[in-house]
Amino acid sequence: MPRSLPEDPLIRSLVIHARRAQMTRRGVLAGATAGASALALAACAPTGVTKLTPGTDVSSTDKSMVWANWPAYMDTVDATGAHPTLDAFTKSTGIKVDYREDVDDNNSYYAKVKDQLALGKDIGADTVCLTDWMVSRWIRFGYTQTLDHSKIPNIKNLNPSLLNIDYDKGRHQSLPWQGGFAGICWNKQEFPNGFTSVSEMFKEPKLKGRVGVLSEMRDTIGLIMLEQGVDIAGNFTDSQFQAALAVLKQNIDDGVIRNVKGNSYLDDLKNGDTLAAICWSGDITLINGSNGDKWTFAIPDAGGTLWNDNFLVPIGATHKANAEAIMNWYYDPQIAAQVAAYVNYITPVVGAKEAAVAIDPALADNNLIFPDAATLKKAFVFRTLTPAQEQSYGSAFQSVLLGA
Amino acid sequence: MAFGSFGGDVVAVEQPRRSSRAALWLLLPGVVYLAATYLAPLVSLVITSLKTPDLVNFDIGRYLYAFDVQNYVHVFTQYGAIIARSFGYSAMATVFALLISYPLAYFIGVTLRKYPLWQALALILVIAPFFMSFLLRTLAWKAIFADEGPVIHFLQSLSILGPNAHLNGTPTMVIFGLTYNYIPFMALPIYTSLERLDLRLLEAGSDLYANPISTFFRVTVPLSLPGVVSGTLLVFIPATGDYINASPQFLGSTQTAMVGNVISDTYFNLLDYPSSAALSIILMVLILIPVSVYLALTKTEDLL
């Protein structure tokens, strides 16, 4: 119950005035809330699973394209920043390439473009290179365009073992760009004898708090599972995954592993916080070149993981034929060898090794760039997970990473 | 209130005006802006936090509209400890920032008052770090405190730290980073309060036989309270949700995750939007409770 109004006429009128103003303000706020709810509801358009239509290809009239790729993944002249093989492509085909180092992490790149993809819109890239499991998600969602193999005759040079991958049999949606191993690396000044397994690193007392592992679940858990004798390429069970995760959690809780990181693990190797780590093959060659020859990379005796980053053409892209032309270009063994000489990762192109001998015989002998049969025997591809597994494994892995 | 107390004899009664309608019209742009940028996202956040996975077409990041309160239960049981940790870190950082900022602000605002040039220079020194990205500054600390870095070697040579000790990735470093990054937000409001502190009141205190300590606590502190309150809030609220300092890329590790890291990872890596939305709402509510208690206790809500 409101109190009765005061006697004094001046105060009385002031109170009435104030009450009226308050009422109106409330009214305005109520209106605003209603407006906001309407806005929010409007934003909630139904998100059914609809089939998307590919973007119109304007390649024949517009000789240009955009390529989004990972950093340090292309031959570069350090002084000028030019990319010789790309420039040669433009010279030979007349297609101008806007090469962007836009992909820093599969998840964050996906988070950036997923809304446009879901609407079938152009994401501002005509081809993108992403890792196997992320490519498999794009294909599952219908976010990729079908490649016209007749425009990529050099596809005959694709390493046969990569042709019938489980998420894209026959490679009609994707094509490997570069691959690599996840294995172990250590500071060879501190540990000249090195390590042969992940658990040796975990058990070494001098390494307590100085071990790093990757935030890429398939690599870190994959290596632990391999050591536990699990076939990561085959039908492993949930409990086998959990067993490997338990080892990781134990070592994090015990303070053996201090950090779990993506690409930035290299900073910790360089500043000495990390002395041994689970890491990617090409990176170690690269930092040995830039920060003094201090580290050794090895695939553990029990095996390492093998992954590929793959070209794909996003659903809304408007220069598919140009993108196919550039894929064809990089499947020429000569060109592939030039790229391999710079990026230090595994090329999927057969014949590149022979071409590399001409550039530098030592390069062709590098087992991490041109792996021989014995090396490949130790490398395994992590099986493609079902969506439900991806969700539950990812969630469990993240909980461990967050210390929850 | 405190500001107005010494303003002299202001005639309080104004002529009744009939401009309230015009004032409301003038408010309109602000209200529209708030509705579009604050209320609408808030409503959308609540709706998202109640979504449920699409079990028919199950896939990563695919959710349906629902009223799934289970999301809240799930994140609270799963990440309750991390939420508590966030509040702990943030409270400690706020206390440290206050302990460092108050003397600093007093020095600049009161002691240096006689030397305007020095005062201006000192203020610039407080603000200057703002001109550099705080990500870079935080990364610089990481390098300084690296295991093979100068600080660790120095502390080890003094036997303060053991041979295998480290600082990066420990809670100490995260609280240090939070304190360091938010000090200007504490120092500047306190400085603004102290800068207009009437020194004659301090003289009056000593005239009334108060010793300096009791003058400080009975005169200076109450008069600077508005600055302290806004400074504390400006530090505590963002520090609780901070996800940079505690992230493994910066000063933290897997042992130091804060709720902001959980929200960011859940959103970007797992694409689990309902859980991250539920966490955001829990965080918002949990911050509102201590803040309103604090404001009620310090009786300064009219100063915000």
Image (spheres, coloured by chain):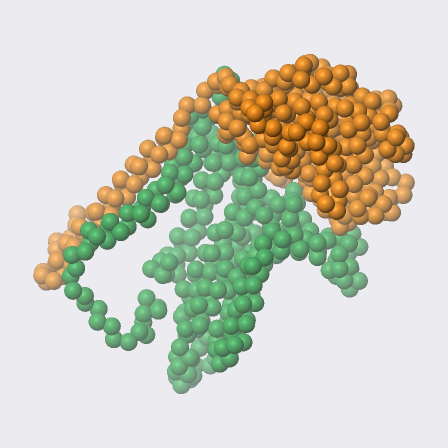
Q: Residue at position x 28%, y 44% from top? A: A29
Quarter of the rendering occupied by the C terminus of chain B = bottom left
Reply above or below: B198 against A212.
Answer: below
Chain coloured green: B
Chain letter for the orange part: A
A267 relative position to A391: left or right:
right
Q: Is residue B287 left or right of residue A256?
A: left
Q: Choose top left, top right, bottom left or bottom right for residue A176.
A: top right
Residue B256: x and y in percent read 62, 46
Q: Residue at x 50, y 32 (%)?
A: B273
In the foreground, A190 or B221: A190
Quick check: can you spot residue A326? Answer: yes
Res A282 → quadrant: top right
Q: Nearer the viewer, residue A340 or B151?
A: A340
Question: In which quadrant of the rendered image does the N terminus of chain B lie?
Answer: bottom left
Please name the residue shown 56% across and 67% down the image: B125
Any part of residue A274 in sight: no
Left or right side of A189 for B106 = left
- Name the residue at 47% across, 40% down: B280
Residue A130 in picture, x, y percent from top left:
65, 29
Q: Position of residue B255 (x, y in %)?
A: 65, 44
Q: Is residue B212 above or below residue B101?
A: below
Q: Quadrant of residue A72?
A: top right
Give the camera-side residue of B273 and B139.
B139
